[in-house]
Image: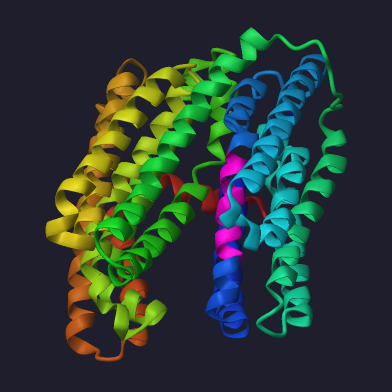
Amino acid sequence: MKNRSLGLNAFLNGLKSILNLLFPLITFPYVSRVLGVKGVGIYNYSNSIVSYFLLIAALGISTYAIREGAKYRDNKEQINKFASEVFTINIWSTLVSYVLLLACLVIFTNLHDYISCILIFSIQIFFTTLGTEWIYSIYEDYAYITIRSIIFQVISLILLFIFVRNKNDYLNYAAITVFSSIGSSIFNFVHARAFVKIRLTWHIPWKYHIVPILVIFASNVAIMIYVSSDITILGIMKNTYVVGLYSVAAKVYTIVKNLLSSLLIVTVPRLAMLMGKRRMNEYNQVLTRVTNMLLLFTLPAMTGLFMLSKGVILIISGRPFLAATPSLQILCLALIFSLFSWVISDCVLIPAKREKLVLIGTVISAILNIVLNIVLIPFWSEKAAALSTVVAEASMMFFNLYFARDIIKSIITSKDFKNNLLSSVVGCGGIILICWLCDIGWQNWIPKIVLSVVLSIGIYGAILVFLKNTTIYSVINNIKNKFLKN
């Protein structure tokens, strides 16, 4: 199979992530005004309940399928057999998820008020399994995923303005959300025939598949616990005002983190394929490029967001949420730890079949996060929750570094990596200077942020070129070559 351009894949996946962020920014102000507090509350609560059962149905299958399937993708017979086995396991986990959901609806009477909305959302569980999104990651078909995503988001937006007109239309809103998922999944399943032929099978080597799947699932559960524990513990130990402040800071942090990770996630199947086929020279070349690109984008994003946190909070949430600024500034520091941790986990340890070590690091980091929250929140409120996240993400990164040291030591100790790190740090100094000057010279936050971002990109790029950053030179040369070919 012809390898697709990692640069093009990164662009397409980044575009999809940007659209996934923009559409809620368009729809949420409309929905919140039409449905009101109660309608939005029912919608979000029902969705949150179903999300746990989506996690159960998914197990760790997507991550496992990308890792294992990537090395079979050039062999039709093997990939058809593998995909059918994994899909059948996913169908069984989906059935278990539905049984558990129905049991909860019967046992917990407080869910009865939300049963209609929960049942609508629950349709997603089956169709998410049917969608087999992991096939498109294995074959790096991000163009299809992006186009499909845009089409269904536009359709959903139109349906939203037609069918959600008053505060009793929260079920319509839930149905529109589910429609987007169903439509995407059906198209996925049909289009997947271009790559593999999936059939249900009774002949599954359960011992071979189930252990790594369950280990990855346990890691996903641990991650979900320590991602969600901040807000849960804040709600128990403090009040809704503090939770609201932290939620805004965490939302901005998550948006930036997801956007940056979307540029890198396209490398996972490529790296899994190269390691699976023991093509270690090529693997090291791609991983070196990924780590250098991570430095190139994450450090300036972290620095810029830290400097502009106050303005970002003001524009997104308004003056009542200004007290969230310190929390966002603390969370900015977690970006570099979180993204490096994710790269080492998904691009090194899991392709190397060391998912048990990932689980160990995740569980320890989750426990650390929860303990720090319990100890510090009474004193520092939402700032303590932000700090505990930074410490947990740093802990996870250092555990992953230790567990992967034999594979990545040559990369992170290389002269190129050190030079790129130094030039990026100096470039971030330029960003700090620009943001400080713009803060002195402008009062209105919108032009201040726009000017700060534009000038920061310019000064950062200029410093990298001046200091001969190899990654930026590689990007410039690639652009030149493409223009010369055209």
Name the image quarter holding the C terminus.
bottom right
Residue 434 left/right relative to 216: left
| Magenta region | 43-55
The secondary structure making up most of the magenta span is helix
The residue lying at 19 percent from left, 55 percent from top is 377
Q: Is residue 246 magenta?
A: no
| Left or right: residue 148 compared with residue 301 | right
Residue at screen point 33% across, 46% down:
295
Looking at this rendering, what residue extends furthest in the bottom direction? 443
Task: Reply above or below: 452 against 95.
Answer: below
Q: Nearer the viewer, residue 214 or 416?
A: 214
Viewer can see residue 153:
yes
Query: Viewer-proximal residue, 469 or 165?
Result: 165
| Residue 140 coordinates in the image, percent (x, y) | 67, 38
Which residue appears at 75% of the width and 19% of the height? 85
Image quarter where the N terminus lies is top right
- Across and down, in percent, residue 132 comes to 74, 37
Q: Residue at x 71, y 77 (%)?
A: 169
Above or below for 215 versus 415: above
- Work out which residue is located at the far left of the displayed protein and give it: 379
Colouring of the image: rainbow
Q: Where 256 sits versus 326, above or below?
A: above
Q: Nearer the viewer, residue 254 or 478?
A: 254
- In this view, 242 is above or below 230: below
- Would you say residue 483 is visible in this rendering? no
Find residue 311 and report its horizontal and vertical position in percent.
30, 78
Q: For this view, does 99 lie left or right of residue 343? A: right
The quadrant in which residue 136 appears is top right
**Quarter of the figure with residue 17:** bottom right
In this orientation, which residue lies closer to the viewer: 171 or 226?
Answer: 171
